[in-house]
Image (cartoon, grey):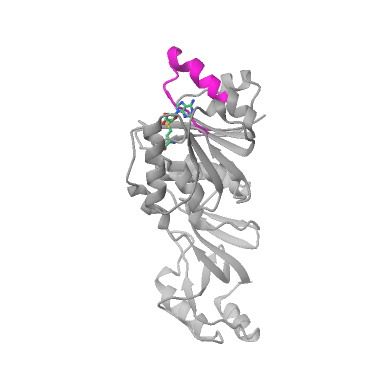
């Protein structure tokens, strides 16, 4: 059985399975076998479209009563706290008992509870024959407001994919300096800022670059959007994200795209490239190491397909 300091659960729509598994692998270096993960890595669930809850485990016991006994024995103290039962998977037999279980645990905690605006969230859950109690962090879903950004266009990515790009780029390390070289209306930049990254964008089309700036201003986010050709970028970054323009890989546009990829190679050792076609042979030909890739579909019918390539020099 897997173990770790943290227990997380994920949820996704059927068509997002690949995207979720790809993100989990990049963040936790783990396979998505089911919807529950044990790991020592601390990630805020709100940076992800798929992570729902994280419990930092304090007690792991065979019975719920042993959890209650441990709270009492340790004289567990907290103020402005709230205890919540978290169902980590659909068929959790305790879901209907959740309120009662939370109350029983809460009554054994020394301190004042707060149900309106708790400062400390505590979680209880049951998974594969064990009970867990610990500090709970939940996805706040505030990022969903970005779905209504004021300006968009047909080539803009969805919010889920934009969040995954940030996470696979950084592997959850918020100290990484990121750049989105063809940032369009700033969909990826918004998620980068939301998750706390130093990220900037370049966009060749002045009107589109201005829309990206207006989108950022709308959410009171601060990031530099440079109007210009990404081939003029001279700084070096930890990771470059390239949502390729002219995304049909026609003969006509091919050279433009490869010139973008070749320049991206010069400004970071790690690259996240988004394409509408399978370009693996070309990436090999460019001497790029493909570390992982994902084929993501936006609808079950598969009429919107994007490949995300993680490459290193
Ligand atoms: C696929 S769109 C990016 C969409 C973006 N991810 C979003 O969600 O808004 C590609 C963008 O790259 C821009 N572009 C094309 N060539 C460029 C270049 N050489 N340097 C910078 N931007 C470029 C296009 O104007 C277009 O807005």
Q: Residue 28's spot in the image, x, y percent? A: 61, 49
In the rendered image, which quarter contains the N terminus? bottom right
Q: 103 or 120: which is nearer to us?
A: 120
Q: Residue furthest top?
A: 251
**Quarter holding ligand 1:** top left
In the rendered image, which quarter contains the C terminus? top right
The answer to whether 121 is drawn above or below residue 20 in the figure is below
Q: Quadrant of residue 132?
A: bottom right
Q: Residue 7's spot in the image, x, y percent? A: 58, 61
Q: 99 or 188: which is nearer to us?
A: 188
The answer to whether 229 is drawn above or below residue 10 in the figure is above
Q: Relative to 270, is 141 on the left or the right? A: left
The answer to whether 46 is drawn above or below residue 170 in the figure is below
Q: Quadrant of residue 210?
A: top left
User: Magenta part of the protein: which range?
Assistant: 242-261
Q: Quadrant of residue 310?
A: top right
The answer to whether 113 is drawn above or below residue 281 in the figure is below
Query: Is residue 13 visible from the viewing direction of this image?
Result: no
Q: Residue 95's spot in the image, x, y percent? A: 42, 68
Give the mark count: 0
> Which residue is at 65% across, 83% downward?
74
Query: Is residue 44 visible from the viewing direction of this image?
Result: yes
Q: Residue 166's spot in the image, x, y percent? A: 53, 44
Q: Relative to 287, is 193 on the left or the right? A: left
Q: Is residue 8 magenta?
A: no
> Which residue is at 56% across, 62% downward?
128
């Amino acid at each position: 059985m897997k173990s770790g300091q943290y227990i997380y659960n994920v949820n996704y729509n059927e068509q997002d399975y690949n995207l979720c598994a790809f993100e989990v692998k990049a963040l936790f270096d783990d396979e998505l076998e089911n919807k529950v993960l044990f790991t020592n890595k601390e990630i805020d669930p709100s940076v992800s479209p798929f992570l729902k809850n994280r419990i930092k485990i304090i007690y792991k016991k065979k019975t719920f009563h042993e959890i209650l006994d441990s709270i009492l024995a340790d004289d567990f103290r907290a103020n402005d706290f709230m205890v919540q039962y978290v169902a980590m998977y659909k068929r959790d037999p305790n879901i209907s008992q959740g309120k009662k279980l939370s109350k029983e645990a809460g009554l054994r905690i020394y301190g004042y509870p707060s149900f309106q605006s708790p400062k400390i969230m505590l979680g209880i859950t049951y998974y594969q024959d064990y009970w867990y109690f610990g500090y709970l962090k939940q996805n706040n879903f505030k990022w969903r407001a970005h779905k209504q950004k004021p300006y968009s266009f047909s080539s803009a990515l969805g919010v889920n994919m934009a969040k995954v790009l940030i996470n696979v780029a950084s592997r959850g390390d918020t100290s990484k300096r990121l750049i989105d070289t063809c940032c369009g209306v700033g969909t990826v930049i918004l998620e980068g800022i939301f998750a706390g990254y130093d990220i900037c964008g370049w966009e060749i089309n002045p009107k589109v670059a201005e829309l990206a700036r207006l989108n950022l201003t709308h959410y009171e986010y601060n990031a530099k959007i440079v109007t210009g050709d990404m081939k003029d970028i001279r700084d070096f970054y930890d990771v470059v994200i390239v949502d390729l323009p002219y995304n049909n890989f026609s003969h006509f546009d091919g050279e433009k795209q490869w010139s973008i990829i070749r320049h991206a190679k010069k400004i970071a050792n790690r690259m996240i490239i988004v394409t509408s076609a399978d370009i693996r042979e070309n990436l090999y030909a460019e001497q790029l190491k493909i570390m992982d890739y994902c084929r993501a579909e936006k609808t079950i019918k598969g009429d919107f397909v994007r490949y995300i390539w993680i490459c290193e020099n």
